[in-house]
Amino acid sequence: MKHKNIILFTALSFVAGFVFSPCSGINLTSQTFHLKSFLQTSHKQGFMIGHHDDTVYGIGWNGDEDRSDIKSVCGDYPAILSFDLGRIELGHKQNLDNVAFDRIRSEAVKQYLRGGIVTLSWHLNNPSTGKDAWDVSDTAVVKKILPGGVLHQEFLKRLDYVAAFINSIKTPKGVKVPVLFRPWHENSGGWFWWGIKCCTPQEYKALWRMTVKHLADKGVNNALYVYSPGADKDAFLRTYPGDGYVDIAAFDQYQDGISHEQYVKSMHTMLQFLTTFGKEHHKPIALSETGYVTLPDSLWWTQTLLPILKDYPVTWVLFWRNARLDHFFAPYPGQKSAADFVRFYEDKGTLFCKDIKISY
Ligand code: BMA
């Protein structure tokens, strides 16, 4: 009975131009609701390809218009473009990787208008020490920013900058662009100030819920929330903020620092777990970051990644940034795995920008 009410309310609010999300109690814009519906079933067509900072720089270029290393290699943009909001919380004009927020906004709009999807991560500075996201020297930092903590009010102002930015991503016609917001990621590791070294599971969940609630209070109705700890199923469950606060269940796992065998094993373990979890909790699942830095294996795409993913209902797979010759995760023209990436692109299981059709 309750379920029927939700459907009815959803239908009514859709007519009114927004859609109530039974998850977080947020009135989603109709475009965001469409994206959410699309993500429920898109895995039946294949998994979408994503790349961080894809259209803002790559190997041997920076700031060019309409350029992308992935497009240069295979002829199409990724279905998902990822950008980072680190330092927006300080009111800065550029993020931690020197990409202007105005540029991120315009790239997000372009991606939406070409029918693609945008995701945002947030490597924010440590609000207690003022150092970067990797500063774990104050193990009480999360406690300090939660309600009742000495930095709580100050931290809400940082969240306000995020809300203002997400609210500001609009097409020339004034349509708010839906985004997949992925805060507080890789918390099962100890390298970020929101990770296991600096908060209890209860504090982490409180931080997550506070974030979702505060952004909603500030009018953010164009964000879906991606929860992505590391590849550790116990840790995934330990800090899961709850079905009402998460739209997509994901994880990050790289092949770096581990053997090929360890990578394959860890991916299968996590994907099997998430497949069951996703079905039980009605959440799409994703591999929100993966890659093999500098791609030393020329057949990595079709011999390692594709065989792992093909049997799971994975919604998207995202590769990290092409920052420099010792820190890139997608091929560029001439790179030794480029030919194999074209085979990966041609495989019917991979979805790039032109392969997806979202009825926004
Ligand atoms: C990390 C590295 C950093 C970068 C950060 C945010 O994984 O690539 O160099 O600053 O992501 O993009």
Image (spheres, rainbow, N blue to C red):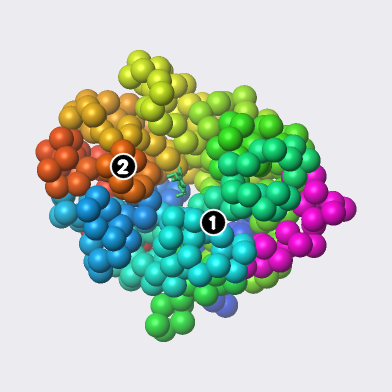
Residue under the image location 41 percent in, 84 percent down = 173
155 in the magenta segment: yes
Q: Position of residue 128 (x, y in %)?
A: 73, 50
Q: Position of residue 302 (x, y in %)?
A: 21, 30
Q: Is mark 1 within 8 Å of ligand 1?
A: yes
Instruction: Give the magenta range.
Output: 142-161
Name the N-terminal-most of marks 1 and 2.
1
Look at the image and tell me in which quarter the C terminus lies. bottom left
8 in the magenta segment: no
Residue 62 is marked as none
Residue under the image location 34 percent in, 48 percent down = 323
Q: Position of residue 94 (x, y in %)?
A: 48, 65
Q: Is residue 95 left or right of residue 205?
A: left
Asked if residue 60 can be seen in this view, the reply is yes
Query: Which residue is most to the top?
Result: 261
Q: Nearer the viewer, residue 91 or 284?
A: 91
Secondary structure, magenta segment, majority class: helix
Binning the other alpha carbons within 10 Å of mark 2 as few (below 14), some (14 to 19) or many (20 upward) gives: many
Q: Is residue 334 left or right of residue 302?
A: left
Assess whether mark 2 and mark 1 are in contact (beta carbons under 8 angstroms).
no
Q: Position of residue 19 (x, y in %)?
A: 57, 67
Instruction: Identify residue for label 2.
Output: 328
Q: Quadrant of residue 68?
A: bottom left
Residue under the image location 67 percent in, 63 percent down = 158
Binning the other alpha carbons within 10 Å of mark 1 as few (below 14), some (14 to 19) or many (20 upward) gives: many
Residue type, numbered disc 2: Phe
Image: 199 above or below 99: above
Residue under the image location 70 percent in, 49 percent down = 129
Task: Give the structural element (helix, strand or loop) at label 1.
Answer: loop
Instruction: Identify residue for label 1.
Output: 86
Task: Give the structural element (helix, strand or loop) at label 2.
Answer: loop
Q: Is mark 2 within 8 Å of ligand 1?
A: no
